Amino acid sequence: MVEDLRKLETDAKAELSQAADAGILQELRIKYLGRKGLFASLAARMGEVPASEKPEAGRELNRVKRVLEDVFKEKEASFLGAVSAAKAIDTTMPGTFFEPGRVHPLTRVILDITRIFERLGFSVVDGPEVETEHTNFEALNIPLHHPSRDSFDTFYLENGKLLRSQTSTVQIRVMEKARPPLKIIAPGKVFRPDATDATHSFMFHQIEGLMVDEGVRFSDLKGVLLAFAKEFFGAKTKLRFRPHFFPFTEPSAEIDIYSEKRGWLEILGAGMVHPNVLRGVKIDPEKYTGFAFGMGVERIAMLKYGVEDIRLFFENDIRFLKQF
Amino acid sequence: MKLPLSWLKDYIDVSVSPEKLAELLTMSGTAVERIERKGRDAVLEIEVTTNRPDCLSILGLAREVSALTGKKTEISRQKSEVRKKSKNHFHFSIKIDIQDKKGCPLYTARVIGNVSIKPSPASIRKNLGLMDSRPVNNAVDATNFVLFETGQPLHAFDLDKIKGNTIVVRRSEKGEKFLAIDGAEVTLGAGTLVIADLERVIAIAGVMGGKWTEVTAETKNILLESAYFDPVLVRQSSRAYKIFTESSHRFERGVDIESVAVASARAGKLIESLAGGTEREFAQKNFSPKVRSSQIRLRAKRVEKVLGHSVPTARAKAILGRLGFSVKTSGADVLVSSKNSRRDVTEEADLIEEILRIEGFEKVRPTTPPTRHTEKNIEDQKARRIFELKKYLAACGFYEIVTTSLLPARSITQAGLSLASASKIKNPASAEQEILRSSLLAGMLQTIAFNVHRKAASLKLFELGNCYGGEKEATRLAIALHGNWAENWRRKSKVSFYDLKGVVGNVWDHLGIESAHWPALIEGRLVKIESKVTNAFDIQGDVYYFETPLDDILADASIKKKPRVETPRKFPSVRRDLAFVVDEKVSVGSLGKLMREAGHPALREATLFDEYTGKNIPSGRRSLAFSLAYQKETGTFTESEIADLQRRVGEALKSHFGVEFR
């Protein structure tokens, strides 16, 4: 009898531990603790037990009954999703601490990108948006009245200053003040008189990078950009360096990223700093070499988050901002 | 630039597929944007960068293909053939008067007489068709054919319509009229480089010919112009009159001055073969200084130093040779002669790029750059702190917005700001880009309106951005509140001035500014936007707004908290409340100040915890309740000490502000 009771206890616990929902639990309750259940039928056999064993069997019968009732109760509570105190309040009502806000998705992308470059030893620097003809063009080897200016249509102010059309201006501002070794990353707004549509905006953001030191090579540019792309877009990212023309770098490259859906997509412009740019800021191009790169933040954000229309970034619809 | 494969094959064998050729070109710097099928022909659409005018011709592209595939081009053979012929005749019966020798350093005129003008044969028409160039007649088509073939623009005049048998190259006078070949009448400004006869302007140099001297079916004699015009002047004319042609596109990028006469001879021959006639005269005015080709030294070691990839000298020489450069060895180095058709190649760095782009960028293996720390920290502290502030405000429940720095004038006036001192944009592309902002207010109100119109019930927004005013660029912070401050099932409250004031205090605290300086940094900058302005933006309800310049505040060390720590007292402070009714004009600030003075030094804090007006309070007065905290240096207060202090504070309030205790 005692053995039968212990076996019943073990079996019941084993089956109970497998029970996945309240329905199964109810079936098990009937099977073990029901009026015609296994426990009841064992209890009915009490009369058959020899008198000498009766006290022990009785104790065991009571113990097993208590244990079974407890484990069923415990299991039941686990399905209700709460401890007994749960009865007092409805825990499914919404929390009432104030909701957090968000940094703008462009800020978020800028932070993510600059953090990677900071880890690679680059320092974040800032530069003005209202610039001079010299910093935006001449110092960057872009002569006046040259067709190469066509890619840099620019807003002018009435005082003769202009709104920078690329963040490369920060290269010049840094190199005019500091000597190599230099490793900078410069995010900021740029402006070009474009008509606005889904992929164009007259204001957008760029991130400029520059490294100048002895012995900096084109292969280092590849290494740095590849390290960045793998960290930002994922370890399997593939880049393609394609020759291009920028007045301020030589050799110059456009860099494409491979997308399963859309093939090669341009994401970066880069190259070795043009000797004329270095000469202009009185850095000896024989002794020092360097690379520079620039990327469009909106374009990268659109690619990374699947944003279809650049205008969403500047409308600031809370329903859009909330998703980042 | 279009490159029809059938035309390319006239000059070079191409054994690879159009797709493979497109890839070769793209990966060497002349990017193929797409491949267009025209019948059995494939036409590559190429994006030619502004430094490569040599690639704006089929022959130039054939040279690129040659460098990439190693196949020889037929270019050299053809050049020598036409050169020999052009040496024969030199008559000067047409007068050529070059008045601007800088604007036109080389001008050639070739006269072909007795032509019969008719449509070109199918083969020419087909080639022009592939270039999307409309066939006109055999003479004009010959000039266009040679333009595409060699990159040298040419123009055919009807010789008999040129008055006075004279070609004048000069600058226009203001108001001169010109009838363009497309029929448009152009009133010229002063200083445009033009071709004229003795009476009138017959072409805008390098841009477009004129109707008055057009070659038509009746034309008998042709004057064929081939020249070199100054790229800047052509660019200025083209932009001034908004006429963009195949010709101006090439001249403004710079044509090869050496191919001016060659192309003329080539076109002359083509006209003779298509339109009959005979070449009668060839005249040339050359003022271009004899440019000696300069030698560029390519150091073997420099290639590896710049690229991190070594190219054997023999291979470098072979690549440059195939690109048409004359190359010699000088010790370990290579000497390369510069050439007119590639004026983008002027120094060693340019040669290195030429070698690498033919060799292939993919050959360079990525490396890790040398690590040397900068001696001076060049990190921008301001940039870092602004990022930190953005993250902080977001954590406080605010959404960062980024609005455009350029705004329409109407938004500025709607926001109640003055246009008088606004920075205007000289060349906006639309009315949305007229004004460079001097404040963040208009952008903020636009954003609130945009969201309110989309049923947003609670707006907590900030923007950190640069503004421009008084010739100075400055970073500014704007924070705005609209609608509900809390909107959950336990708490609902409208935004108030004090919600915003609290947040601004947090901002100053985050920036490490001593609280004693906060009032001065908030005064006048924290406002409720006037309903006249919110109405203009169609915003219902209050907008609380704070805007401040940041640069000076971030830079000012004198307002920063100085870390000094006070050990917390062993004994807790004693708290007592004080509630009274007072004239509503008496400020909480002045009451607090008085209480602290009266209770000094035991009174540490006097904090407002309730304000009440309305029932049982006479109008013009309000009931205020303060919590006062007393603290001793050592030990605890007795009940009578506290009662004493409370009395002292109470009497001060009575005598100064006439408060009534309740």
Image (cartoon, coloured by chain):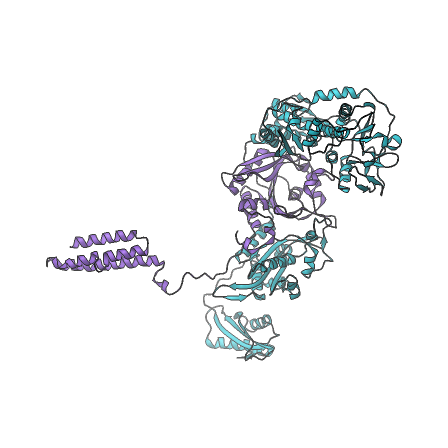
Chain colours: A purple, B cyan
| Residue B576 position (above or below residue A172) | below
| Residue B154 position (above or below residue B662) | above
Name which quarter of the figure residue B552 lies in.
Answer: bottom right
Residue furthest left in the image: A51
Q: Is residue A6 visible?
A: yes
Position of the N terminus of chain B, as image quadrant, is top right
Residue B60: percent from left, percent from top: 68, 28
| Residue A303 position (above or below residue B228) | below
Who is closer to the viewer here, B183 or B152?
Answer: B183
Residue A232: percent from left, percent from top: 52, 43
Q: Is residue B349 visible?
A: no
Position of B73 with respect to B194 (left or right) is: left
Who is closer to the viewer here, A202 or A173?
Answer: A202
Position of B90 with respect to B616 (left or right) is: right
Residue B601: percent from left, percent from top: 54, 70
Name which quarter of the figure residue A296 lies in.
Answer: top right
Residue B291: percent from left, percent from top: 77, 27
Name which quarter of the figure residue B452 lies in.
Answer: bottom right
Position of B634 with respect to A302 (left or right) is: left
